Amino acid sequence: MNKIIPCILLIILLSACNKKQSARSGCPIVPCPLDLGTFVTYVDKNDSAIKVKDFHAVDLRTNTTIKTSVTINLNPGTYVIADYSNSNLFSAAGDNVQVSATDSLTGQTKTVLFKLALPVCSCGIEKISGPDTVKFN
């Protein structure tokens, strides 16, 4: 009986792995680089990075606010729009994502549009369009 339980657990584990593999059937097996996500940097009129408040990103196709799991310290003024933990939100064709933030000193709000996708057989989120830097006046 004691030998049967580990065998059953192994069979369950292998069948779970097999289901994940079949969801991406037809995709080549390739190593994926560590992809932390899609970023945007906010700068002032002198091109100096600034902190913003009320930063948020919304997938306009699903009207879902995007929450990220990246917990590393980024460069000042750099914010994560989306990371691999939210990749299930995006279609292969790409979704429009509205990103807004307010300059913490002037109170000016900027809203920009990105197009993000999770292509079939991809390792991570692809930025199709959108700025790398947003400049406040």
Image: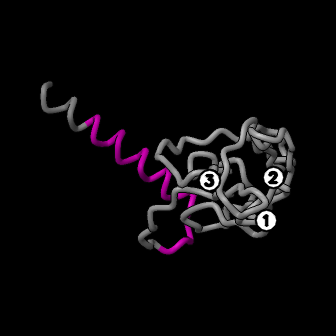
- For mark 2, does the 10 Å Cα neighbourhood hold few (<14), some (14 to 19), or many (20 or more) residues? many
Magenta stretch in the rendered image: 8-28
Q: Magenta stretch: residue 39 in it? A: no
Comes first in the chain, label 3 or label 2:
3
- Label annotation for residue 46: none
Please indicate whether residue 118 sits to the left or right of residue 54 in the image: left
Question: Considering only vertical position in the picture, is 131 above or below 98?
Answer: below
Disc 3 marks which amino acid? Answer: Thr
Q: Residue 101: where, in percent of width, then height?
A: 78, 44
Q: Position of residue 107 (x, y in %)?
A: 84, 38
Q: Marks 3 and 1: in contact by CB < 8 Å?
A: no
Q: Quadrant of the N terminus?
A: top left
Residue 89 % position (x, y): 71, 47
At 76% from the left edge and 44% from the top edge, which residue is drawn? Answer: 57
Q: Quadrant of the C terminus?
A: bottom right
**Residue at image mark 1:** 130
* Tag nearer the camera, 3 or 2: 3
Foreground residue among 41 and 70: 41
Q: Residue at x 53, y 58 (%)?
A: 22
Identify residue for label 2.
97
Give the secondary structure at mark 1: loop
To which quarter of the image does residue 129 belong?
bottom right
| Label 3: which secondary element | strand
Query: Foreground: 26 or 1?
Result: 26
Q: Residues within 10 Å of mark 3 (few under 14, many from 20)?
A: some
Magenta span main SS: helix
Closer to the camera: disc 1 or disc 3?
A: 3
Q: Which residue occupies 79% across, 62% down? A: 115
The reply to whether callout 2 and callout 1 are in contact (CB within 8 Å) is: yes
Residue located at (29% from left, 35% from top):
9
Q: Provide the residue designation for mark 3.
A: 78
Query: Alpha carbon of mark 3 to alpha carbon of mark 2: how far?
Result: 17 Å
